[in-house]
Image (cartoon, grey):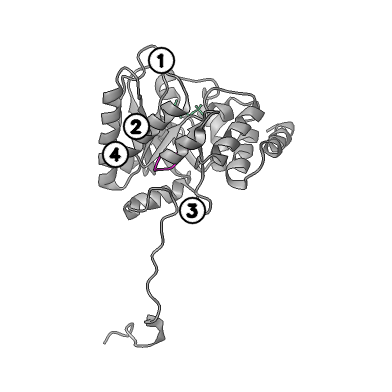
Amino acid sequence: MPEADHEGKTYYTDVPQQGKLFFLKGSNELDWGMKNRLSRIFNPGDGRTVMLAIDHGYFQGPTSGLERIDVSIMPLVPEADVLMCTRGILRTVVPPSVTIPVVMRASGGPSILKELSDEEIAMAMEDCIRLGVCATAIQVFIGGEFESRSVVNMTRLVDAGLRYGIPTLAVTAVGKELVRNAQYFRLATRMCAELGAQYVKTYYVEEGFETVTASCPVPIVIAGGKKQPELDALKMAWNAIDQGAAGVDMGRNIFQSDSPMGMMKAIKAIVHGNETPEKAYDLYQTIKNKGN
Ligand code: R5P
């Protein structure tokens, strides 16, 4: 018999093999690779994430705060749990030695000069694999002019992702003409989850956000939206987490702040440290006053 095979206590014949439920809502039946990638995006300790979103250039060019990602954004990256960006920025600006997971913007087409819902899948799954991404992200325009196409595009990306174990983040886009309320976001997030997205990004709404998170069977992260005063953005993040969000995917309220590092750390303190908005704001002020 081979030397490694000895009878004895090390077989623990009286201990049944344990199976654990996966920590993320709605994700228990996913395959190992997908769960492993989601475990890099969401902290398995608290089930939450702070994603730094810097993909805005894919339809609006050098957005204020993102003119020089190498100079202004790269110092923030080690503070984030996840970087959400385009493949162009990843290949040109982000050093391959970066170890935080990347969520890849995989849709595109129209610029801000045209109808935004006219998007297509803008990246092959093969390239996502080549770049080692942990998830792809695609805009879904519920109620938009090209609603059906954007929904079907999402399902195609989901199918490709399922083939290779790469989760899909469905981003519920809001058009100028659409009312941003809980009823709308319940519809949009639920549709994305029902059609296969492994997690969904949406916006926070003051009234009834907890019904959006409750009725969506997969984790929800919130976008930051337009730049607000820092304390207001921190309150929004706190409320979203309190009402069931699994984290933030935040851009402008971090990189357009007068202290991006201060906001980055303050948001983290809320999401992972359960800090109050006021305490997190103090942290932001302290970091800002040190000139960071
Ligand atoms: C849209 O441009 C992208 O999906 C952004 O990643 C998303 O809107 C989050 O960025 P912000 O916090 O600036 O809204």
Of helix, strand and loop, which one carries label 2? loop
Image point (29%, 39%), residue name = 158
Nearer-N-terminus badge (1/2): 2
Q: 263 and 274: which one is in front?
A: 274
Q: Is 220 covered by the magenta stretch?
A: yes
Segment colored magenta: 216-221
The reply to whether callout 3 and callout 1 are in contact (CB within 8 Å) is no
- Label 3, label 4: how far apart the Cα atoms are: 23 Å
Nearer-N-terminus badge (3/1): 3
- Residue 96 position by quadrant: top left
- Label 2, label 3: how far apart the Cα atoms are: 25 Å
Amino acid type of the residue that numbered disc 4 sits on in the rendered structure: Val
Q: Which mark is residue 158?
A: 4
x, y percent for residue 64: 54, 20
Frontmost of labels 3 and 1 is 3
Determine if residue 249 is in view.
Answer: no
Label 3 packing within 10 angstroms: few (<14), some (14-19), many (20+): some
Amino acid type of the residue that numbered disc 1 sits on in the rendered structure: Ile
- Label 1, label 4: how far apart the Cα atoms are: 26 Å
Q: Which mark is residue 44?
A: 3
- Residue 16 position by quadrant: bottom left
Reading the image, the residue beneath label 2 is 106
Q: 135 and 88: which one is in front?
A: 135
Q: Is 246 covered by the magenta stretch?
A: no
